[in-house]
Image: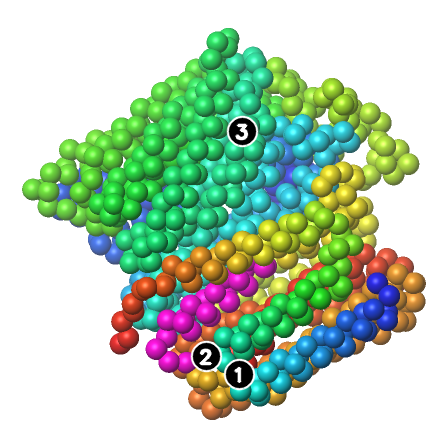
Amino acid sequence: MRFSTALFVWVLLVLATVAELALFRIPLDRTVFTVALFGLAGLKALMIAVFYQQVIREGRDVAAFYLFALLVALGLIIGTLTSMSGMTTTHV
Amino acid sequence: MAEITPNSVRYWLFTTNHKNIGILYLVTSFYFLLVGGALALLFRLQLAMPQAEILSASSFNQAVTVHGLVMVLWFLSPLAFALANYIVPLQIGANDLAFPRINALSYWLYLFGGVLAAIGFFTPGGAIDTGWTVYAPLNTAKYSPQVGTTLGALGLLMLIASVTASTVNFLVTIFKMRAPGMRLMHMPMYTWGILLTVFLMLFAFPSLAAAGLILAADRALGTLYFASHEGGALLWDNLFWFFGHPEVYIVLFPGLFAIAEILPVFARRPLFGKRVIIWAAVAGSILSLMVWGHHMFTTGVNPLWREVMTVLTETISIPFGVITISLILTLVGASIRLRTPMLFAIAAIAHFIVGGITGVFNSSVALDYGLRGTYWVVGHFHYTLLGGAATGLIAGVYYWWPKISGKMFDERLGKLHFILYVVGFNLFAFPIHLLLDMPRRVYTYPLESGWLLNNIVATAGALIFGLSFLLLFFNLYRSLRKGADAGPNPWSSWSLEWLVPSPPSPENYGGQPVVSADGIISIKPLLVNGGERIHVHHLSKAPLLVSLGTFTVFLGLALSVPIALVGLAILVASLVIWAKESWSSHHMEGLQFERWPFRGVEKTRLGVWWLVFGEVVLFSGLILSYLWVRFMSASWPAAGTVFDLTIGAANTFILLTSSFTLVAALAAARLGKHSMVRAGLLTTFVLGLVFLLNKALEWSQLFAEGHTFGSGLPFSAFYVTTGTHGAHVLAGLVVLVYLIVRSFRKPEEIHQSVESFGIYWHFVDIVWVFLFPLFYLF
């Protein structure tokens, strides 16, 4: 990757972080805030994976297994959190 | 390293050759079988009669727990790895595994992990006694205060590290080191079985790793996850069973695919539906990651979720039904030679069918309410894992023993072993299905319960079954002393490993095996390295020392800090030895060829990618745990009120910048600008160090304010999650030191290493990208 591209990506990552901090200061609906905050985090992660880890240069096979790992991870998180809906706990 | 005599003690301590490591795994897994088997006989004797006093309640719990853990984790999978280590490189035409020293490291971590857990028996209060599922809150200090449980948890972490290293090694070996012309569908079935096994291990074990890390933190540091009344127990259930259900297939596949290797040879006809079996197993693997909830039907989880899990669990029986039918159809109308490996293979199929059918009952929520926690479940999983998986592996041991030893075993003794094995196993495992109303986890029972007869028969069967293994060991030992020479191919088999002498030479093949388009295998002169044989070093002391250092650190964490410090010193010294060895041995690792998939991805880089894929699941387990306790908690501090946002934001900028400087170093390495490479690596190191110092500052501030590990779930979650991430940053800094030194000594060779390391470092950055908003802004 060209140095200028790497620098540009870094600037974008910094700006996205600044945006996250700004979101924190702005009074927003909780749902909007959550979606925006983790949307920005996801965008940053995607930029790092694509440009710094160079997933695309590695080819489709690596990208496919990366995606599979993410699906497994999301399955674990979403599956488990879904299982708790409707449950009650005892606070002692 | 100075010359070491083959077969001396030092030779076996330092060997990295895949066949030697396979033999070490074989011997060690059989040792753990003896340990686990002896414990089983002890508690079977205790249960043979009502009100027996052979074991106390506490000893019974320890025996049952260690038996379960040892048999599943220290016997079954390692026995599969024993055969895999020896056979897989031979079957694909490779001269070793992709990373021989990491292979040795896997073995030593496995052995020391077992020793660490076993030390618990000699500590006050005894060994881990929570049941093999280590359920919360039984696993917490309140209900299991003895240090033996902490040692068990730490031993488990060492085992997980061993498994992770092995999975990466086998995945890279199978994908990058197959002989020219050998397509994936050309691979022998056992290699396919190992490929699917390690693939599942890579995605299932990190969940157990997350649970184990949290458990170790709860016990050693005093964090509060699993002791929490706010869902702590169910959190363990989810993390454990996300690993635990795929673990059934992790244990099953090697045995099942060994059977698929053996049946065609002794039936003298091709395997029926090879492609169908493989695709069915792939489907079963993926489904196995989606059915963990059926182990929690009785815990009060969401009803709709239970229904989804029921459907998925019943669906998973379809691919395994297809596999079983294909195996049976291989035998229909065949001219069968009933030699010992074949007998065990057929018995394994029969047992697996019983285990499979009884398992379907448990997938129904209604039936599961009645059967859960009874001996029915014990009967079901013993038919599946012992009768099916272990019997398949024993068939594999008999089948490949002539290749490993170069000697034939006694067929009559083998058949006698088979008869005692099958009779003993069925006498043991069938009657316990009938104990439908006997709870699993009681150490004694009253006479009037009506459980006596089935328990007596089961105990007698277990004794016969256990003693039958002595025949196996005697037969194998006797073959070494008096067995007839096996020759290269005693069974008239078709796969690649039978082309070479028994046992094979250290380099496996005199030339390069090549598979032609029509599947004909030939061995050609070497096609790489200018036709010269590449000398492969087979000795390294580093893997043993790294494992010893890790063992000592963990022992110290459980017993006393000075011991941990000694371990740390050993670990640092051994890592230096490791790094120095790699500088002096360019050709230590095996050959690689370009083929689908992962064409063009260099093998070290591919190894790091696989590691990262596993790490994705590990951190998802930790993030899930954080979200779980947060959503379950009645109250949670608002963002920005406890954790210092300034430090969090500063660390985010620092880590993002370190990713950029590493990319700059890589760009410089590609251009051959050595001073720029050093500057980039040094800057990355400094930024990583500042990140850690910042984190240390943050932790010390929190501690000074009275927010320790045990100050509540928000702090437990913060310390465990960011601490694990910090440990990853620290590991990255250790590698950076190595790269910096190397950039001065051999700057022209740094490019590939920086590229591979970058994959890891950027991943650590990605994790922080999510941890920052989760802990500081959300």
Q: Secondary structure at mark 2?
A: helix
Examine the structure image and report whether residue B650 is included in the region drawn in magenta.
no
Residue B547: x percent and y percent? Answer: 58, 56
Could you tell me which residue is drawn at 11 percent across and 38 percent down? B450
- Mark 2 Cα within 10 Å, few/some/many (few <14, many 20+)? some
Question: Do the residues at discs 3 and 1 belong to one chain?
Answer: no
Asked if one can make out residue B629 in the rendered structure from this viewpoint, the answer is yes
The amino acid at mark 2 is Phe
Mark in the foreground, 3 or 1: 1
**Residue that badge 1 annotates:** A28
Residue type, numbered disc 3: Ile
How dense is the environment of label 1, judged by Cα within 10 Å: few (below 14), some, or many (20 and up)?
A: few
**Label number found at residue B277:** 3
- Residue B31 is left or right of residue B535, and the answer is left
Indicate left or right for B773 with B33 as reference. Answer: right
The reply to the same-chain question for discs 1 and 2 is no
Residue at image position (58%, 45%) is B199
- How far is the residue under mark 3 from the one under mark 1? 54 Å
Please name which of the two marks, 3 or 2, marks the residue nearer to the observer.
3
* Neighbour tally class for label 3: few under 14, some 14-19, many 20 plus, Cα within 10 Å: many
Tell me which secondary structure the magenta stretch mostly adopts: helix
The answer to whether B675 appears left or right of B61 in the picture is right
| Residue type, numbered disc 1 | Leu
- Chain at tag 1: A
> Which span is picked out in magenta?
B614-636
Pinpoint residue B569: horizontal percent, then vertical percent.
62, 68
Assign a secondary structure to mark 3. helix
Image: B350 above or below B695: above
Residue B626, magenta (yes or no): yes
